[in-house]
Amino acid sequence: MLEEIKSIEIITPDDWHLHLRESPLIEKVFPYTFTKFGKAIIMPNLKNPIIRLSQAHEYYKKIKSLIIPGYNFEPLMTLFLSEETRLKDIYDGVKSGTISAIKFYPQGVTTNSYGGVKDLSKMYNLLEKLPDLNIPLLIHGETTNSKVDIYDREAYFLEETVSKLIEKIPELKIVLEHITTKDSVDFILENNSNIAATITAHHLILNRNNLFDEGLRPHYYCRPIAKREEHRMAVRNAATSGNSKFFLGTDSAPHLDKNKESACGCAGIFSAPNALGYVAQVFEEESALDNLENFISINGAKFYNLSLNSTLSKFTKFKEAIKYPSKIEVGKELITVFNPGYPLYWKNEIVGEKNLIKEKF
Ligand code: DOR
Ligand code: ZN
């Protein structure tokens, strides 16, 4: 029996940025999410990106079919912004309740983004329609200009693309995904309430030195790449502050080991099995456990105008380290689970319906 040190009960969390992939990966990675989260924004960058509403419907059905009875998980589907994107798919998708957001990948910026948009100004006509539908544009915020140093690409992108977009369509709701810099934190705070940001567990923990700890660490490589320590601290302060503009998006992004441990390794960190535990640990380290519920369970739903989950989750700190798989198997292949290099002491589980636990609500 593990020895409990402390525990808190909060509304069951959501993941506002998640990659589930397709068979055979999805069957292996998804249980780590539907057993711990109430909802998640599902990224559309499949090999064949989710551009049409019919593709989103199919993907939604596939995801739903994998949920074990007893879990109430809801996948929130997104469409991949491309020059082929049709307004009708967006309208119909939002009206039918299938589509919760549109995702913009600058062309070629990361995994399966070759069909992304090169020049966002070409899409302004379409983006102008989003405010009426009350759904946000989710932005992978890095320039694809290879002359810009990779560590500066997020900051550069704010001026190059995001500022112009806000100036042109100030009513557009925007989520700047997986922010990694002080520049982005300041940008979010300086702009109006239509812009918010997701933050990953790994960017709260890693700085750019960790990529080279005693050698090259392919399992710490993701996009945007981890930045200097001062940036990590700025992002950490933003997350733990409780400010409603910041919420958890794990960006859990599984790739087979053979594709990461390679001469040209893929970007992505698979953190679904332990992201929530490590986030709780970060909040404890920052003496900010009172703000954990805002960051993982409240702020995102409020920004998206969605209801809070109806269940509670118990987060418990144990005296002994929590075991989690270091790798998961997919047929003969493996996927490495995020390991920050120090033990995990926090574990969480869904414990029941909110209305059964009267004293809190
Ligand atoms: O590291 C990343 N991996 N960043 C992204 O933006 C995409 C993701 C993926 O799909 O692998
Ligand atoms: Zn992502």
Image: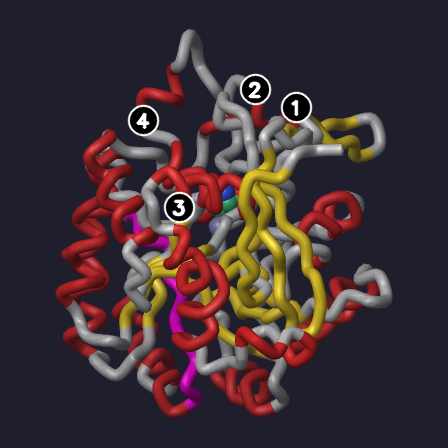
Q: Which colouring convention does the figure follow? A: secondary structure
Task: Name the N-terminal-most of marks 3 and 2.
Answer: 2
Q: Residues in magenta?
A: 133-142
Mark 2, Cα crowd under 10 Å, few <14 / some 14-19 / many 20+, is: few
Where residue 71 sits: x, y (%)?
77, 65
Rendered residue at 56%/34% (across/down): 345
**Which callout, 1 or 3, points to the residue nearer the camera?**
3
Tell which of 185 and 162 is nearer to you: 185
Q: For the residue labelled by badge 2, is the local secondary structure a helix, a strand or a loop?
A: loop
The amino acid beneath tag 1 is Lys
Task: Name the N-terminal-most of marks 4 and 2.
Answer: 4
Q: For the residue labelled by badge 1, is the local secondary structure a helix, a strand or a loop?
A: helix
Give the spatial CA distance, label 1 vs label 3. Answer: 34 Å
User: How many labels were placed on the picture?
Assistant: 4
Rendered residue at 70%/62% (across/down): 351
Give the spatial CA distance, label 1 vs label 4. Answer: 23 Å
Tell which of 251 and 229 is nearer to you: 229
The amino acid beneath tag 3 is Phe
Q: Which residue is mark 4?
A: 208
Q: Which mark is residue 42?
A: none
Query: Is the C-beta separation of discs 2 and 1 under 8 Å?
Result: yes
Q: Which residue is mark 1?
A: 258
The amino acid beneath tag 4 is Arg
Give the spatial CA distance, label 2 vs label 1. Answer: 6 Å
Q: Quadrant of residue 177?
A: bottom left
Residue 30 in view, yes or no:
yes
Q: Which residue is mark 3?
A: 283
Q: Which residue is mark 2?
A: 262
